[in-house]
Amino acid sequence: MSEEKKAGKSRQGASQSAKPRKSATRATVVRPSRAEAEDAVRVLLRWAGDDPAREGLIDTPARVTRAYEEFFAGYQVDPREILSRTFSEVDGYDEMIVLKDIRFESYCEHHMVPIIGRAHVAYLPEHRVVGISKLARLVDAFAKRLQIQEKMTAQIADTLNEILQPKGVGVILEAAHQCMSTRGVHKAGVSMVTSRMLGTFRSDPSTRREFLAIVGNPGAMSVANT
Ligand SMILES: [Zn+2]
């Protein structure tokens, strides 16, 4: 019982049918059929106040369901797998590797509306490096899910740190949240900045400064939550 009371689990359970769930972890969530998902979209169309049977909306449930497969493609990806192929022959390269301005599209887990932003991902290699496109794929693997920005920042940094075991990792995310701009407080043009610094990025101010200088946003640290 206390298990069910834990944050997230109880909310998920409440929105579902009365069927009890032993565990609401991602691996055990039963995916509905496409027809069930399309029916759910029809319900939301009626909730919005429109008629799902009118001509313009007739194919909308099928389109939305397909769009969801793109929006949430990250659930089909194992982020650790992306980083599994590493290269150890780097000819002694031991400087910082930075991929900056990686655009991402994510979705707020509280309102299911877009979070659009940029990620800057850096690490100081110890022995191994990964292909640079893998860093962008790592960002997408976590972005294409229901997220909060703080969690996504930590997941990217922690996965990179765990798999590559570099000397340090730095991740900064800057993003605009449509749940702030199109509803609620209706504040457009606001971006949220989060960061996570591990290893030398946390312990060595000069490494951190170099990273911030490269991404061209040294002011980020004033609002970052390292
Ligand atoms: Zn939100």
Image (cartoon, grey):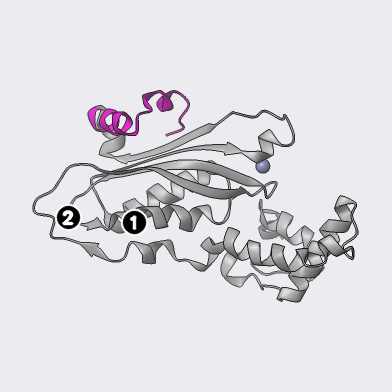
Specify the farthest residue to the front. Answer: 55
> Ligand 1 is in which quadrant of the figure?
top right
Mark 2: which amino acid?
His
The main secondary structure of the magenta stretch is helix
Camera sees residue 24:
no
| Identity of the residue drawn at 55% across and 31% down | 191
**SS assignment at label 2:** loop
Q: Position of residue 41 (x, y in %)?
A: 79, 62
Dot 1 amino acid type: Ser
The image position of residue 34, as x and y in percent, is 71, 74
The magenta span reads 206-226
Question: Disc number at residue 127?
Answer: 2
Circle 1: element type: helix
Q: Which residue is mark 1?
A: 133
> Can residue 224 be found in the magenta stretch?
yes
Q: Position of residue 157 (x, y in %)?
A: 39, 47
